[in-house]
Structure formats: C-alpha cells, structure tokens
Image: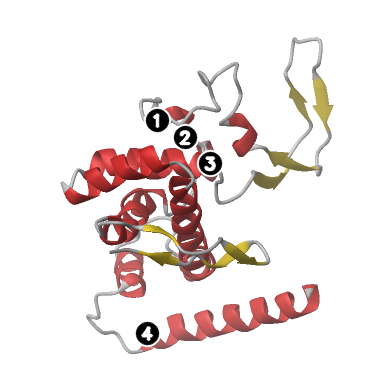
Amino acid sequence: MAKAASQAAAEVRQWLDETIAARKAKRSEKDDVLGRCLALQSVGLPAMDDLSIRNNLLGLLVGAIPTTSKCCAQALDQLFARPEQLKAAQAAAVTDDDAVLAKYVFEALRFNPNNPGLFRMTAEDYRLAKGSLHATTIPKGTSVLAATQSAMFDERMVDQPNQFRIDRPEYLNMHFGYGLHTCFGQYINRVQIPGILKPLLKHPGLRRAGELQYVGPFPSSLPVSFD
C-alpha cells in the first residue's frame, strides 16, 4: 500500500507540474484556482512560486473532497443520534439561520471529528509543560500527535464536555487545528460543510435508514430517508 501511495503521489506531482507549465506557456484569462494563483505569482506575491502553487493544489486534491464529505457524514450521524438537536438543526436550516446551523453541525462533529489529532515531527528539542511536575523533553525529529479530539473533551478547559451545547466559545473548536498548521481550507469549510447539509436537513421527516459505513478511515455510505 505504501508503495502504491508513493507511486500515485509521484504521478500527481508530475501531472500538476506539467499542468502549471502548460498554463504558463499559454496564458489565458481562465478564472479558476490555478489561474488566480498564476495571477498572484505574476505580481510577485510571496509563496506563489510554481512549487508552492503545486503544493497548494495537491493539498486541495487530497484534502478537500474526502475530508469534507467525511465531516458531513459524521456530523449528520451524530445529529441522528440526538433527535432533539437534529430537530433544532433542521429548524435553523428551514429558516436559513446559517450561523446557528453551523453551531449545531460543528458541535455534532466534535463528538466524531475528521481525525483524532495532527501528526507532526519536532523541528528542535522541545520542553513540553515546562515548569510543571510532568515536564518532558521531546527530542528533535520525534513524531508526535497533537490530540485535538482529546483537547475538545478536556474538562479542565471545556465545561461539561460530554454535553451537546452550541454556546461554547469558538476557540474550543479544534477541527481545523491551530497556529502555524491551521487547516488551509478552514474558511471555505466553515461555510461549505453546513451548506452541504442544509438542503438535506430541510427535508421533513429526515431520518436514518441505515448505519454509517466506512471503507478505511472514510465513510462510504449513510442511508437516509425523509417524507
């Protein structure tokens, strides 16, 4: 599997490099993501060299579709498990109260988020919890997991973490990471994920017609029915 993944990655990188080069060789006014990136490159915007553009496009291809659909399915699954909250989310959808709908969707997602954390590698020796009795030095080059799912249920920071509440401060929401490695698509997905679920939630009598199924880490199906 690792070999197949490495081969696929190399092929996608080559395809993107060729696509970027071809578009630059034959300039057009096509208004798409690549066109806008090249326009920004032409005016000298930092971090818009060919490699950076390729990396951003690769991130969109790998992350945008599977993670977005996963979040939608898992949030809806959690709402199905809570009839009262499902009813309230549907009311927000019907009245086009997008702000309230988003609160229900992302609070539901807290109970089964896109991933349990972020895998990273330390760039230098780091003293974790410095000054405390449980301080630990993490050596440079160590693989670490920032456990964002656990953080969203940390009772030292989250009031009654096991309750479904839409009045929590936004900074407790760790779905998109934090700091330097905040999700590239967070601003799109804060709108897109509730927006995808909204038309479905507007259907009266929306209910589960089967269990959420997975292939690997990603949902494959969540049967629903409505009146």
Residue highlighted by disc 3? 177
Q: Nearer the viewer, residue 49 or 183?
A: 183
Q: Residue furthest left?
A: 95
Q: Could you say where residue 19 lies in the image, as x and y percent from the top left?
A: 45, 84
Which residue type carries mark 3?
Gly
Which residue type carries mark 2?
Asn
Q: Could you say where residue 226 lies in the image, as x and y percent from the top left?
A: 32, 63
Residue highlighted by disc 4? 23
Residue 43 location, quadrant: bottom left
Which residue type carries mark 4?
Arg
Residue at x 56%, y 61% (from the top left corner): 211
Task: Report how far apart the C-alphas of labels 2 and 3 lie in the structure.
Answer: 8 Å
Nearer the viewer's eye, disc 2 or disc 3? 2
- Element type at marker 2? loop
Which residue type carries mark 1?
Glu
Q: Along the polypeptide, which appears first: circle 3 or circle 4?
A: 4
- Element type at marker 3? loop
Residue highlighted by disc 1? 170
Residue highlighted by disc 2? 173
Residue 172 appears in the picture as rendered: yes
For the residues bearing labels 2 and 3, Cβ distance under 8 angstroms: no
Mark 3 nearby-residue class (10 Å; few <14, some 14–19, many ≥20): some
Residue 131 location, quadrant: top right
Q: Is residue 33 left or right of residue 183?
A: left
Examine the rendered structure and indicate whether residue 132 appears above or below residue 98. above
Q: Nearer the viewer, residue 65 or 79?
A: 79
- Element type at marker 4? helix
Task: Report how far apart the C-alphas of labels 3 and 1 lie in the structure.
Answer: 12 Å
Residue at x 74%, y 24% (from the top left corner): 128
Task: Report how far apart the C-alphas of labels 3 and 4 lie in the structure.
Answer: 33 Å
Residue at x 81%, y 44% (from the top left corner): 141
- Element type at marker 1? helix
